[in-house]
Image (cartoon, grey):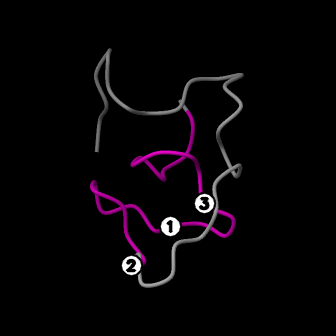
Amino acid sequence: MRLRTGSPALGAGVPVPGAGVPVPGGGDRDFYGNPVPDPPNVGAYQGHGV
């Protein structure tokens, strides 16, 4: 998936990758179909930073 400016993708230097808390029963994919890492990112986007 190609992300556009203003997308929820994580930019370089943001403090949210891997800073989330797993949600029991939260599923294994994000809104965009990316696998949810452990620990997850903060927010709906769980893909790699751009």
Q: Is residue 18 magenta?
A: no
Q: Which mark, residue 27?
A: 2
Instruction: Give the alpha-carbon distance from disc 1 to disc 3, as whole Å.
Output: 6 Å
Question: Do labels 2 and 1 touch, CB within 8 Å?
Answer: yes
Horizontal relation, residue 25 to residue 32: left or right: right
Of badges 2 and 1, the one in the foreground is 2
Q: Which residue is mark 3?
A: 40
Is the residue marked by circle 3 packed among few (<14), some (14-19), or many (20+) residues within 10 Å? many
Instruction: Give the alpha-carbon distance from disc 2 to disc 1, as whole Å.
Output: 8 Å
Is the residue marked by circle 1 packed among few (<14), some (14-19), or many (20+) residues within 10 Å? some
Q: Which mark, residue 19?
A: none
Which numbered disc flags the more N-terminal residue, 2 or 1?
2
Q: Is residue 28 above or below residue 42?
A: below
Q: Which residue is mark 1?
A: 36
Identity of the residue drawn at 30% across and 63% down? 33
Specify the segment rendered in magenta: 27-49
Q: Amino acid at mark 2?
A: Gly
**Local SS, label 3:** loop
